[in-house]
Image: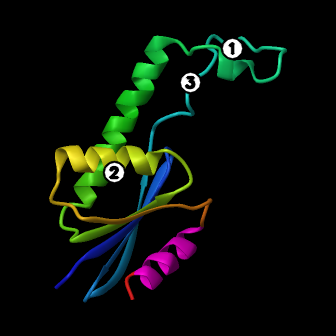
C-alpha cells in the first residue's frame, strides 16, 4: 500500500496530510520557535525598517536555530514511512526542511516543492488530495 504525504510548513506550524489506501489523516505539529530574533532588551527604534539593518543578538539566533532543529526533527519523524512527499508553504521553512531531508535521509522522495500563501487545514488537505489523485 503506497503512502503519500503532503506537508504545509512554516516556522510556526506544520500540517501533515497522509493519503493511503486506508484513507486520509491530518496531523498538526506546532513549533516552539519564536519569531525571527531582532532587537533585544525591549529597545525599539524610531526609524523605519531598522530591525532589518541591525544584527540580532547571537544567543537569540542560536536559540532560534536550536528550536527549529527540534521542530524539523519532529516533522521528519512523522514523515518516516512516506513513499512520496509534497512540500509547500509560504516561507523559507519548506526549503530548509527539504535540504535537511536530502542530507540526512535520502530515501524520502520529494515530488514537489511549491510556494503557497497561508491556508486553512481543510484547504491543505484538499490540495494534497487533488495532487495525489
Q: Which element carries disc 1, helix, strand or loop?
A: loop
Graded by Cα atoms within 10 Å as few (under 14), some (14 to 19) or many (20 or more), the crowding at tag 1 reads few
Graded by Cα atoms within 10 Å as few (under 14), some (14 to 19) or many (20 or more), the crowding at tag 3 reads some
Sequence-wise, the earlier of marks 1 and 2 is 1
Secondary structure mostly seen in the magenta stretch: helix
Sequence-wise, the earlier of marks 3 and 1 is 3
Residue 56, position in %: x, y? 56, 16
In the picture of the structure, the residue carrying the numbered disc 3 is 37
* Highlighted range, magenta: 120-131
Asked whether residue 123 is drawn in magenta, I would say yes
- In this rendering, which labeled residue sits more in front, label 3 or label 1? 3
Residue 116, position in %: x, y? 57, 62
| Residues under numbered marks 1 and 2 in contact, where contact means CB atoms less than 8 Å apart | no
Vertically, is 19 above or below 75? below
In the picture of the structure, the residue carrying the numbered disc 1 is 42
Q: Which element carries disc 3, helix, strand or loop?
A: loop
Answer left or right for 91 relative to 52.
left
Sequence-wise, the earlier of marks 2 and 3 is 3
In the picture of the structure, the residue carrying the numbered disc 2 is 98
Amino acid at each position: 500500500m503506497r503512502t503519500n504525504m503532503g506537508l504545509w510548513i512554516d516556522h510556526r506550524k506544520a500540517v501533515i496530510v497522509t493519503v493511503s489506501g486506508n484513507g486520509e489523516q491530518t496531523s498538526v505539529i506546532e513549533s516552539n520557535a519564536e519569531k525571527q530574533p531582532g532587537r533585544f532588551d525591549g529597545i525599539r527604534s524610531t526609524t523605519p525598517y531598522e530591525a532589518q539593518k541591525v544584527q540580532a543578538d547571537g544567543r537569540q539566533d542560536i536559540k532560534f536555530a536550536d528550536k527549529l532543529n527540534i521542530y524539523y526533527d519532529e516533522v521528519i519523524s512523522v514523515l518516516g514511512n512516506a513513499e512520496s512527499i509534497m512540500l509547500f508553504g509560504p516561507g523559507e521553512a519548506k526549503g530548509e526542511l527539504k535540504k535537511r531531508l536530502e542530507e540526512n535521509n535520502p530515501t524520502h522522495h520529494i515530488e514537489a516543492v511549491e510556494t503557497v500563501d497561508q491556508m486553512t487545514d481543510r484547504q491543505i488537505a484538499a490540495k494534497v488530495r487533488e495532487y495525489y489523485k
